[in-house]
Amino acid sequence: MWVGVACAALFVHLNYLGITTASPWDPQAVKQPLSQFPGLHEPQKPVVSPEKCGVDDVYRVPCGEPGVAAAQCAALNCCFDGQQCYYGKTVTVQCTIDGQFVLVVARDTTLPRLSLDSISLLGGSDAPCSAVDSNADFAIYQFPVTACGTRAMELGDHVVYENKMFSSYEVAVGPLGAITRDSHYELYFQCRYADTAVAALAVQLASNSPPMPVAASGPLMVELRLGSGQCVTKGCVQAQAAYTSYYTDADYPVTKVLREPVYVEVRMLGRTDPNIALILGHCWATSSPHPFSTPQWDLLVDGCPYQYDRYLTTPIPVDGSSGLQFPSHYKRFVLKMFTFVDPDSKAPWREKVFIHCSTSVCQLTAADSCEPRCTRQRRDVAAAGRESSHKLAVVSSGEIIFLKKP
């Protein structure tokens, strides 16, 4: 039996948006010096898009005064359908003339969708920092600019009040690392008050730039690649369509968001013997290109899904119906995208994730189909038998890099 290691590197994308509005007010506020707001810059212009405004009628939250005109609605960074002004699928930050923050948070602000129950401010999540109203898709927050941990400072002729909104998330802990597939949302926001104007500002955190891809090979040619095919006809099965095309060197880096399916294929190259089969022993992920670095997260163990992951890796059968000349030379599986978290703080890392697979070649016989048996007792017996009866060697495949979506 020949053994190899195949690797893939992935970057995680989290989708954030910030909003601005303006209205007049003569502030009466306590002025205290404070360190500069992260990434401080001028207020952004309102953005309206079809994706942002595609809110179901039953979940729409009215924006502005009744009868507000289209221009006024746009100035509030809200959506207008010709009759109604309403909040879009994002986070809208507004500052009132009487010194109140108003935040309207949509579940669709992130991918995967944000859990509205997980949101906190610097002052916590209890009243008056809790949502004052909500429905299935939106949560509304309103609190004084002096409450909920808000910090105040003087900036030129403005008094600036700043706070932070962030979400909690579920962390899965394994023997050699921890991961999350939940969106981790952080938004810094401000209200700026001057003698003649009020402005709101929201700032997102910047992402990291990825390294260039590298590749390695060995005596047994094993390739790991990702399927890029999409269903285009009614009744199409995405798990099959994904492997009709593959990302090429020109496509990288490729963007994946948390929980998005990642279709993986490992195949032997340069072999024409129909009586041998490719075996995936252990597939795992690391945060660096070195396959034995930590942290690690298991995907397949002895060819079977790692049982302590809520989102089980799913092997995809490859048989004669695939149209491949040697289907036993291929292994396919799909995983849900994730990111590693810091082992101490449990904060999500904004870094790439490398996937590795140990591979082997098995001789097909009447007594051995070379397929894993994924019941707990039989799986251990079958794996031990193969390891003791075949000669071992090591090979590495190339890397594939995923990048955060802009």
Image (cartoon, helix red, strand yellow):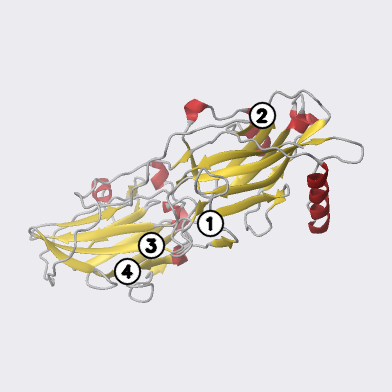
**Which tag, 1 or 2, sits closer to the chain's start?**
1
- Mark 1 crowd level (few <14, some 14–19, many ≥20, 10 Å Cα): many
| Residue at image point 25% right, 69% down | 150
Q: Which residue is mark 1?
A: 179
Whether residue 124 sits left or right of residue 329 in the image: it is left
Pick the residue in front: 298 or 313.
298
Residue 166, numbered circle: 3
**Which tag, 4 or 3, sits closer to the chain's start?**
4
**Which tag, 1 or 4, sits closer to the chain's start?**
4
Residue 219, numbered circle: 2
4 vs 2, front mark: 2
* The C terminus, quarter of image: top left
**Disc 4 secondary structure class:** loop
Q: Position of residue 115 (x, y in %)?
A: 48, 61
- Location of residue 277 with respect to 122 vertically, above or below: above
Q: Amino acid at mark 3?
A: Phe
